Image: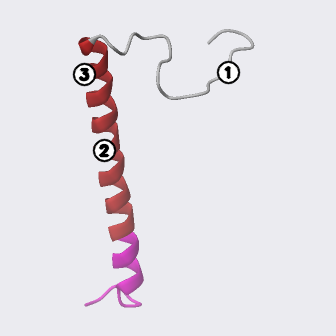
Amino acid sequence: MLHGETVHSPLPQDLPWWQPDHFVFFSVLYLVLFIIASGMGYCIFKAYQDTKNAPAHGHH
């Protein structure tokens, strides 16, 4: 990153999006990142729910 440069978007702005190879690559990249983030969010939520619903001493 250059001095004085700011980040405005996670998408690369200077790529020619009309070219299929750029469009497909970044579409798949952000789809995979979204799926990974969703899975991690689900696991964190599920762990929180399991912890909240568990008995006080950890015995069933």
Query: Mark 3 against mark 1, which lies toward the viewer?
Result: 3
- Residue 34 % position (x, y): 34, 43
- Residue at figure coordinates x 29%, y 89% from the top left: 59
Determine crowd level at label 1: few under 14, some 14-19, many 20+ residues with C-alpha closer than 10 A. few
- Residue at figure coordinates x 33%, y 69% from the top left: 46
Which amino acid is tagged 2? Answer: Ile
Q: CA distance from mark 3 to mark 1?
A: 26 Å
Q: CA distance from mark 2 to mark 3?
A: 18 Å
- Residue 6's disc is 1
Q: CA distance from mark 2 to mark 1?
A: 27 Å
Q: Is residue 40 above or below residue 21?
A: below
From the image, which quarter does the C terminus lie in? Answer: bottom left
Stretch in magenta = 47-60
From the image, which quarter does the N terminus lie in? Answer: top right
Disc 3 to disc 1: CB gap under 8 Å: no
Query: Which residue position holds label 2?
Result: 36
| 3 to the left or right of 15 | right
Which amino acid is tagged 1? Answer: Thr
Query: Which residue position holds label 3?
Result: 24
